[in-house]
Amino acid sequence: MTGRTLARYLIVVNALFTAAGAHAALPQQAPADTPARQASTTIEALPPAPPANATTSAPAAPWLSNAFDNTSAAATRVFDDQKQIWLSPFQLRFSDAEWLVPFAGLTSAILLTDRSFSKALPSSPHRLADYTHLRDGSVGALGAASGGLYLWSLHTHDQHQRESGLLAGEAVIDSLIATEALKFAAGRQRPLEANGQGKFFDGGNSFPSNHSAAAWAAAGVLAHEYPGSMTKLLAYGLASAVSFTSVSSKQHFPSDAFIGSALGWALSEYVYRAHHNPELGGSAWNPVRDLFRSSESGPARYPGSTYVPLDSWVYLAFDRLFALGYVSAGYQDARPWSREKCARLLLDVDQALANSLSANHPENSDVVTLVQSLHHEFAREEAAFIGPNASAAIESVYARVLSASGTVLNDGYHFGQTVAYDYGRPFREGTNLIDGASASATYGNLFFYVDGEYQHSPSAPSLSLPVRQFFADRDKVAVPPATPFSTINRFALLNAYAGFNFYGWQLSFGNQSLSWGPGIGGSLLLSNNAAPFPMLRIAPEKPFEIPGLSKLVGPFNVEQFYGRLEGHQGYQPWIYGQKISVKPFRSFEFAYSRTTLIGSNTYPLTSRQFFYSLLGRIDPVEDSVPGDSRTAVDWTWRVPGLHDRLTFYGELEDDDDPIPLQNLTKNVVRPGLYFPRLPFLPKWDLHFEYTSSTSPGRASFQNHGDLNYWNLEFPDGYTNDGDLMANTVGREGVSLQTWIRYWASPRRTLDFSWKQNIVLNDYVPGGGKWQDYQASYSVTRRSGLYFKGLLQFEHIFAYPLLFPGSRNNLVASLELGFLPQWGRQSAVSTTAENTQTGRPLP
């Protein structure tokens, strides 16, 4: 890096931090009669401005007396403002990370995606000119409002009007100085230059948008000087129009407009709080950090919490408690759950145990032991109920060796998988190795999680010509080359994300995996069979009530995500999804969910395509709803009369139809039964599942695997980095599976499973059929040391396309690891006491 480039980089970093430091540069503004504690947490309105005929009674600041004083004083203030603004990063405090980190994460996400987003926007000269005119007109309207107030005040002698015009102009000047300095330092090319590469330090002037900065600088002052709803709507509406049209006119990238808008708004806050006279009217402007800040001491109101990994023992433990009737508050079908949510579910369990004891029901020692182990697991989160939410911990250190001797299946999208639901880790015949570690941290409403590992998998020969021709025929692609598969030695980030809890909603960005279905056999819509992919996930910590409607169907749990996939040929598609869950009865849970792939080689993503897809409207260009949508409904039902003996659960998934129920014979189906305890065998439980994607009701053009998990616009299918993101039953297949578990203790279990798989010969010539037999053992010591062992025998009866005759393979896996127990040791004795006395934890 040259000295000039380094200097420019440092200028950019410092200038970006000025927006943050401006929030810390001044004390909280509040009316004189507002208590200090109240002013620090809420935005309070000042007393109304005095009547027009009394404006002269307010003491006038010297710079409001005449035009000459206005000009000279404004020049002095701008100079002083610049000194304070550029030095403000030194006034940042560690606690400002509560809002700086989310802002930095959002900025990073926009920077990573804005080039592809900008390229996808329409480029017709007529449309670009229209957007440019609209941007200039919106900026002119805000400038006219600011300048008009000042000029009109010279006639009316209204000090409030004069201050409004002067402060708006001062904020605009401050923002333009800052953005011009950033433009010079960043040197970013504009979207219509150099094929839209948007390179930094290359002599351009795109980053940031000074139009957006000026618009938001003026809008912020005007909206607080005249805090009425209509004024705010007009001011912020015009500023938003400037930011939007700066991008749609291809004058700027999205990150240019975002940073410019944020910088302008932050500087308007600084100018207003530094120079506004509260006696003239207007409203107080509290720092943006107050929207995020938790209490300085004691429990956080909205604590940030990391998520429990999908392969954790915790979910099987809660499934058993749900099925036995000890949990009624949560939702089982949208995972992962946050650790804080799990801790609160345990409060529900404690209350159910206390009620059972008070009713003189016999104590279930297995349940009490299971609950004690869960309290031990979530002791840190329970401590945050009454204390600060601050932690940093190594969650796990682990090593696994998995050896496969014989022919294995490792392509669930086309054929099937010997090992499934393993985060897309590479798996081939021979010895496969994994070494990894995970860590987490929380602070107030912030949370961080990272799980990274080294992965090794042996090489493999190239695919045969018949197999490659099959790919070309079924996927509608060119015949792949006969390239051998090289040895894999790589470092991979699995779940790695950061986020914050915003008023009870957890927003997390980074690599994440989701499971949107009940049971343990792999959701039909989203599972952890593929590698985690980068996404923005928005999930509530608690279900919420909708007046009137919740009386009929119970509280609502609504999740959504927006992400991007990898491993597709050419354009990498985007994916988004929504899931709505309700619980009309304690024993019955129902959910509707939808995911959509959008953006292909033929139709790259545009804003128009996205909104047409989101609203289900037909795009006249494509003559269809954009993207590849699939919907699902799922349910969990504790069967009446057998409440603690049998749970019936299942899923229906449908490609393209808005509701799976409208064409049952076309659906992919996955019903299941769960017996949480067996007669005379209280330590055993049993799962049974049947899954079919044969879809007898499909249309003729959807034969040969051209329906489920496949789309002509997305020939690589519903995959991420080559792995199916849903159930490995695949495009046309049937599976039947049972699992039985022996709970020697909550952290010492023995599992057996059997699975039969069939692939239809309508899809794969000759079809395929195989069976898996598996036994596994897991134990975790109190010290945190754990061991997992697995032995699986697979017999492939026939798969003519892949090989002649039958084949066998044997898979053995050994995993050793350490789960540090710091901060969890104190929970067990407290829980035992509380469950025995019937007193729930706080």
Image: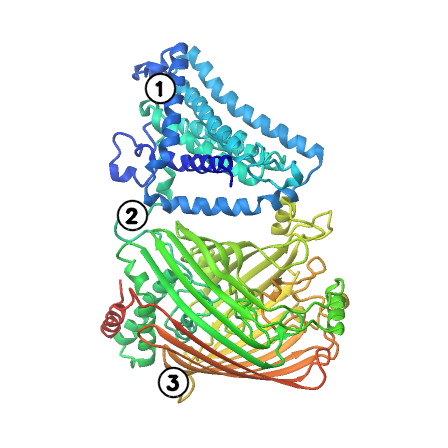
Residue 793's image quarter?
bottom right
Give the SS element for disc 3.
Answer: loop
Give the SS element for disc 2.
Answer: loop
Q: CA distance from mark 2 to mark 1?
A: 39 Å
Q: CA distance from mark 1 to mark 3?
A: 78 Å
User: Depth-wise, is mark 2 or mark 1 nearer the camera?
Assistant: 2
Residue 758's image quarter?
bottom right
- Taking the image as shown, residue 254 lies to the left or right of residue 348, namely right
Q: Which mark is residue 682?
A: 3
Q: Amino acid at mark 1?
A: Pro
* Labels 1 & 3 near each other (Cβ < 8 A): no
Residue placed most toward the observer, 772 or 60:
772
- Taking the image as shown, residue 819 lies to the left or right of residue 719, namely left
Mark 2 = which residue?
A: 295
- Mark 1: give few (<14), some (14-19) or many (20+) Cα within 10 Å: few
Residue placed most toward the observer, 433 or 786:
433
